[in-house]
Structure formats: C-alpha cells, structure tokens
Image (cartoon, rainbow, N blue to C red):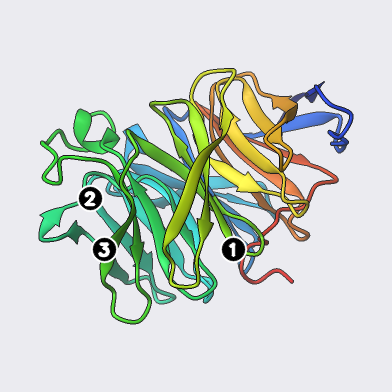
Amino acid sequence: MTETIPAVFDVLDERFDFKGDKHVERLASGCRWTEGPVYVPAGRYLLWSDIPNDRMLRWDETTGAVGVFREPADYTNGHTLDPAGRLVSCEQGTRRITRTEHDGTITVLADAYDGKRLNSPNDVVVHSDGSVWFTDPAYGIDSDYEGHRAESEIGACHVYRVDPADATVRIVADDFDRPNGLAFSPDERKLYIGDSRRDHIRVFDVADDATLSGGDVFATSTAGTFDGIRLDDRHRVWAAAADGLHCFETDGTLVGKLRLPEVTANFTFGGAKGNRLFICATTSVYSIITNVNGARKPYGLR
C-alpha cells in the first residue's frame, strides 16, 4: 500500500493559489539518491534514476508496481522525452547524452566537445525543433559515488546544444560554475538554468538562431541548492531545493513552497492531464495531484 503524508504548503504571496490533494504519496523508497524523473504517457509509467546504485527504476501508474527498468544504467541522472516519445538520458558514467530508441537500442547523441570528453551530463531538455540542450557539471567525475573519478578534459562546466540537423555540439553558455537544472518557457523564448554552486537560477533570452542573451539572476535559493527546474502553464518557475519545491512568479518573487520530508533533487509534471507532480527526494519518490498543469506536457499528451 502506498504511504501517505500530509501535504504542507507555505503560502508566501496571495498569488500562490496552489491546491490539490491533502496528502502526498510516497510511491517508492529505499534508494540512495533519486533523480531525473520522466513520465512516459505511452506506457503510463514514471522512470527515474537511483544514481549511486547505478540503476533506473520504474513505477507503473496502473498497478503501482515498482521495478528495475535498467541496471546497470551508466549512472544516469536527468531524463526527458523527445518529440517522438523516445527517452533521452544523461549518463554520468559514460559521460554522454544518449537516446533510447523504440526498439530498445541506444544511440549516442553527444559524448565530446572539440575532441574532449564531456564531464558528466546532468540534466537535459529537448526543444520542439529536436535540438537537445544539456548541462555538464563535474559531479559524476568528482568521485566514484555517482560515476567514475576522473579529471575534466574540458576544464570547465558548460551548457551545450546538440543540433538536430548535423549533430554538432556547441556551447551556449560558458559562465557557470556548476550548471544543473534547466527548462524552457512555454513559448521557448526563455531558458532558465540553475547554478548549483551559486545557489541561483538565471534566465536567458533564446534567439531564433538558438543563441542565448541576458542571463540575469532570476531567483536565489533560500534553502540549500537549486536542482531541477520546471515551468507551469502560467509561466511560473518551480525549482527543487533542500526543503521541497519552490514556486516563483514571472517577476522572480517566491510565492510558495510545497515542503517534503527529504532533500529534494528533481521533479516533473505528468499523469493523464499533466497536473500530477512526481518528485524525487533523496531516498524516495513522491507524488501529488494538483490544480497546476505543467507548461510542457509530456510528449504524447494533448
């Protein structure tokens, strides 16, 4: 039976009209560090990474069953779906971005920049034009805990884009310490990127040629490090932090929080209507159905 705990909301501004279940469900536990949740509507299941245990797990929405999806999993971290519904993953162990094809085979999308191996890709989003954008901090090579200890060949931590036409990899932002979560606005004209060493989120304007400008600080964390980022359909920015999920209005005002009992790493919107939050927090995965819809529904939901 699924365990439930009371849902705790901090209303810091009257604009935070977040409502939903009075409880939060714990769908799974017993992990070491959960990350990278992605909802797959075609199969009505959730995938996530348990990085130190080098495995990916799956929760089935129709039965509630939890099982292993892939093990070993090359210390995968973040995941997303592309427009064709294929799984795109950040592999910290192999230091690459991969795509799982519909027949289960693996295609490498990026593993190097300018002839040098990537550090350890962390989080990834796919633009509607098919381009793949990802962050590349060094967490997977800092030690053997979440990957394999190694020296950085690039010598810095950047944000990259993989071109959908010719698969070229180029840097789109090079002034981060540890780039982490990232998310597009609903119209894809803005890109939000977290820096987990500086504990803030920056916002960039996205030009038609995929270049970024701006980069002002949008929000600074009041509780530990920002990790995963998502937007809802009202363009509000949600970010995972030490005490749960933080919700920011478009002007950067922190308007509310959903508190969790464990340090929160990442989350995603899913379910049949895109209004179910799935949250990875340390050893567990939590869920709550709300009156908030994700800005970008998982591919396959309309």
Q: Could you say which is closer to the camera, residue 75 or residue 195?
A: 195
* Left or right for 148, reference 134: left
Name the quarter where the C terminus is drawn. Answer: bottom right
For marks 2 and 1, the one nearer the N-term is: 2
User: Can you tell which of label 1 and label 3 is closer to the viewer?
Assistant: 1
Q: Amino acid at mark 2?
A: Arg
Label 1: element kind: loop
Name the quarter where the N terminus is drawn. Answer: top right
Q: Residues within 10 Å of mark 3 (few under 14, many from 20)?
A: many
For marks 2 and 3, the one nearer the N-term is: 2
Vertical side of 72 occupied by 172: above or below? below
Is the Cβ of the residue at disc 2 closer than 8 Å to that at disc 1? no
Residue that numbered label 3 is attached to: 110
- Spatial CA distance of label 1 from label 3 is 22 Å
Which disc number belongs to residue 95? 2
- Spatial CA distance of label 2 from label 1 is 27 Å
Vertical side of 95 occupied by 97: above or below? below
* Left or right for 220, reference 107: right
Q: Position of residue 216 (x, y in %)?
A: 51, 40
- Is residue 64 visible to us here? yes
Which disc number belongs to residue 291? none
Residue that numbered label 1 is attached to: 188
- Spatial CA distance of label 2 from label 3 is 9 Å
Q: Position of residue 76 (x, y in %)?
A: 35, 47
Q: Position of residue 177 (x, y in %)?
A: 32, 33
Vertical side of 101 occupied by 262: above or below? above
Is the Cβ of the residue at disc 2 closer than 8 Å to that at disc 3? no
Q: Amino acid at mark 3?
A: Ala
Label 2: element kind: loop
